[in-house]
Image: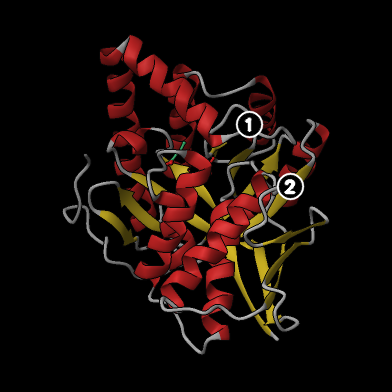
Amino acid sequence: MICAWAHGKAILLGEHAVVYGRPAIAVPVMARKAVVEVEQGPQGEGILIVAEDLQQRYFMGASDVDEHGQFLSAAVRGALEALVPEGPWPSLVIRVRSSVPIARGMGSGAAVSAAIARALAAYFGKEWEPETLSRLVFATEMLLHGTPSGIDNNVVAYERPIWFTKTQGARPLAVKAPFDLVIGDTGIRSRTRDAVTKVRRQWEEAPDRIERLFDAIGEVAQEGARAIMEGELARLGALMNHNQALLEALGVSSRALERLIEAARTAGAWGAKLSGSGMGGCMIALVPPEQASAIEEALRTAGAVDTILTQVQATAGDVNDSGGYHAG
Ligand code: PMV
């Protein structure tokens, strides 16, 4: 039996504006992952996908599958078409489970489809280059999001902090000092597609105002990259707070998110903001390590259904001097 996994992700700065060409920064969330096991199935029975968390079983090619089944089947099909283009495909049992919460802005779809692709490659004795894996995951993400920017598939495939623009793709970001993030889950599911559509409508109605907000978010991401490269965590926190204000102006925040954000700041976070598409889902707080557990507790008291503490490691990167990249 073959087993592979992929981690969740959090967008640190720049969500939504990234769909319109501005830069964004995302980090892997090593504390949560999707795990996929593949084994040979009974001869002639085709491909069975077992979604353990959902307690569902889907046969590939069956016509009566729900949205989750369609997504999982698409991920399997995409990987198999790349691995065994000529066919025939063997009978397989593919078991999927994930500790990345669904529809909370933590990249659960990207993590599941990356783990499926990795497990299937390993089953055939192969391994993906991150770029190929990212492309495969992107194709499946199109089903979920409609017009994804590409940030989720990249951070999940590269498994390291990235600087991302739609035109230039992902570049590894140098992290001078490790930092701790506490993630708080509102428990409210939010569909990326809905939030992206809401922003699109506003942009159509008031393009100048929304473009100005996108520009400001892009500048925050640019400044944030510098703060990460220089290890200036208090500054990074202040930028996260500023990004949150801009996301509120964009209309994608919510009362539940703001309650958690406020609680984290009051309990000593350097900064806090929603993460991902917003309107529900998760918030993230940049926290001094010694405050982490107090902040987690404050979040739970303020109504978080789950909290996750995760560390972003120091690493070298491509983007390691402030002249090396440009917004837009
Ligand atoms: O909610 P998530 O994690 O899927 O994040 C979406 C991020 C957006 O910028 C809102 C959309 C995108 O495709 O980048």
What residue is drawn where x is 44% and y is 31%? 243
Q: Quadrant of the N terminus?
A: bottom right
Residue type (three-letter) at the residue carrying disc 2: Thr
Local crowd size for mark 2, using a 10 Å CA cut-off: few (<14), some (14–19), many (≥20): many
Percent position (x, y) of residue 311?
A: 58, 61
322 is higher (above) or lower (below) than 158: above
**How was this image coloured?**
secondary structure
What residue is drawn where x is 56% and y is 31%? 278
Q: Secondary structure at mark 2?
A: strand
Q: Nearer the viewer, residue 51 or 314?
A: 51
What residue is drawn where x is 79% and y is 53%? 54
165 is higher (above) or lower (below) than 2: above
What residue is drawn where x is 58% and y is 68%? 115
User: Which residue is identified by label 2?
Assistant: 307
Q: Secondary structure at mark 1?
A: helix
As drawn, the residue found furthest toward the bottom would be 125
Whichever of callouts 1 and 2 sits on the residue coming sooner in the sequence is 1
The answer to whether residue 21 is left or right of residue 262 is left
The answer to whether residue 19 is left or right of residue 47 is left
Number of numbered discs = 2
Residue type (three-letter) at the residue carrying disc 1: Ile
User: Which residue is identified by label 1?
Assistant: 261
Local crowd size for mark 1, using a 10 Å CA cut-off: few (<14), some (14–19), many (≥20): many
Q: Nearer the viewer, residue 123 or 176?
A: 123
Q: Nearer the viewer, residue 198 or 318?
A: 198
Percent position (x, y) of residue 213?
A: 34, 22
